[in-house]
Image (cartoon, rainbow, N blue to C red):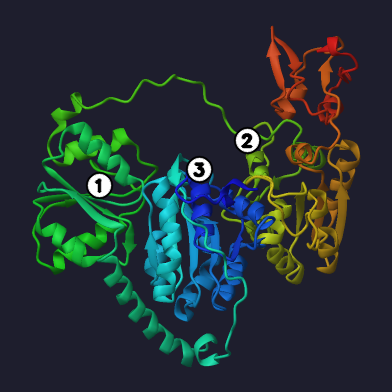
Amino acid sequence: MHKLLTGDPGKKMLLLGNEAIARGAVEAGVAVAAAYPGTPSSEISLHFFQMAQESDLYFEYSVNEKVSLEVAAAAANTGVRAMCVMKHVGMNVAADALMTLAYVGVRGGLVILVADDPSMFSSQNEQDSRYYAKLSGLAMLEPSTIEEAHDMTRLAFELSEQLQEPVLLRTTTRINHSTAVVTLAEITPPKTEGDFTRNPMRYVTVPVVSRQLHVRLLDNLAKAEAIANQSPFNYSEGKGSWGIICNGVSYTYVSDAVRDLGLEEKTTILRLGFSHPLPKEIVNTFLSNCDRVLIVEEGEPVLEEAVKALAQEQEKMLPIGGKGEELFSRLGEFNPALVREKIAHWFGVDDLLKSATAPSAQADLPPRPPTLCAGCSHRATFHAVKKAVQERDVIYPTDIGCYTLGMLPPLGMADFLICMGSSTGTAAGFSKTLNKKVITFCGDSTFFHSAMAGLVNAVFNKHNFTLIILDNGTTAMTGHQPHPGVDMEKHGLSGFGRIDIEEVVKALGVGHLSVIHPFKLKKSIEALQEAFAFEGVSVVIAREICTLYGKSLKQPKMRPFYVSDKCKNHKDCIDQLGCPAFFINNGRVNIDPDRCTGCALCAQVCPENAIRPVKEQTQY
């Protein structure tokens, strides 16, 4: 049995933040869940997927975030509890559905988990999803600890049903990927069958209907504020006249900083967990008892602007700080030392920093830049492309996935990237304004997510570029989740369809289509040269399973390679491929047999034919 399906209420369990959220949803009786994987939220959907095999929960990996929200929204409007999971940039994709769903509302509880990524550990921007709460007019909850993430998830379903609106649950990477002890509650059996009464004047958002629904949304927002003012997730601690307002994980940093600086008697902390709509009554009372206030929030000055506006409305004249040159930045993730320093500076007690607990010294480790895995087929495809273009002037728009790492030397296969699916759209634009060959890349999961639409556009408008679809059989970057092109029978799962990318591309009317197996280097180069010579839209599908995914499927392991005495130490293998299985020992090239997957790409690159498969263990 999956550990998150364990009964025994009151039991304490060590859980990752994302595990705690998934458990909270199950305890609340979630019946339908949908997601497109995206770090830092990916483990939530993974556990839903696993639990769905053993319970009444229906879970799907949707083709993108917009579709996942639409699936969850429809389910919630039949009266069952539903959840949609995504990362912050996924909310951009889902926003079209979200804005109008706020008008329509829900009947069963609908919780939308959005995981923000301050410092961009695995993202292309660090946007602040709190603006989506303001934009949509929906309530937002923000946990400060792992246990609270568990509790908030459970209670968010109740809040959603009370308001008859979706509820946004915002986390950040530090909450998603930290671990703590969580006290389990009772699992509520999910209601899996809903009902729906036709009512076009409520559910069909033509203008005459939406005008009335907008009034309803604003009424619900006022109800949400009244609830926020009574919410146990909004609380203060301390009695001092120095005020600190904080949200999310910032609260834990603030609590530690106040204790470390010995300011417990001088400060009052207001933690806002039900942060939107702003609980004005609570904040107004708080401000009335403060001489000076600091807002501690990662990301944008959302709370700061709201609190300052409220103070102005109430004619409260007191210093309120937050973002600024000598205070907090809008960039990156906070940490305890930073928060301690800024609190001391704002309240004029910098001298207390000397006696505050200093962080323990950390080892000065060498940086480890990200790189494609040893044996990654994308490396072979990129190398083949470089050989095929020869001396042509080329630009390489790319997309979101493992293959984005192709931007790094020695491959250099990425020139432009803005969002998921942008490969085909940006390639079209470049092809119209540049006298260069345009070669763009997208992965198989990204193709289904949103790059397909750009390909349709390119065929219709007769653009001129080559799209290389890097089909490694899985959604590799976020942990090998399935997509519509995956053969689910390899996982022992039935009841799924499968869509062949090659057949889709043919059906779209692409003028030139070929399929390569990139570890067959010579044939791949020839096929690519034909595609590059074609005037119009050409597509090459580079089909080779992700090496890590292949291991998980227990595919036969290939023999590793070694560098024989024939090697003249040209280092072409390292200089052209950059495979992490290579290393230099005493000035000579070597291959780590434990990392080598036996893909044989380097053997095809070596000018002396000096790289050979291992026959005996003594060879390595």
Disc 2 on helix, strand or loop?
A: loop
Q: Residue at x 81, y 64 (%)?
A: 504
Measured in 3D between alpha carbons, the distance from the residue under mark 1 to the one under mark 3, in whole angstroms, is: 33 Å
Q: What's under tag 3, amino acid-wise? A: Leu
Percent across and percent down for residue 230 are 26, 66
Percent across and percent down for residue 401 are 65, 47
Which residue matches tag 3?
16
Spot the residue most to the top: 586
First in residue order: circle 1 vs circle 3: 3
- Disc 1 vs disc 3: Cβ atoms closer than 8 Å? no
Observer-nearest of 574 and 245? 245
First in residue order: circle 3 vs circle 2: 3
Measured in 3D between alpha carbons, the distance from the residue under mark 3 to the one under mark 2, in whole angstroms, is: 32 Å
Q: Is residue 81 above or below residue 473?
A: below
Which corner quadrant holds the C terminus?
top right
Q: What's under tag 1, amino acid-wise? A: Gly
Percent across and percent down for residue 94 are 54, 66
Q: Is residue 529 above or below residue 434?
A: above
Is residue 231 left or right of 583 when viewed as pictured? left
Disc 1 on helix, strand or loop?
A: loop
Q: Which mark is residue 324?
A: 1
Measured in 3D between alpha carbons, the distance from the residue under mark 2 to the one under mark 1, in whole angstroms, is: 34 Å
Q: Quadrant of residue 548?
A: top right
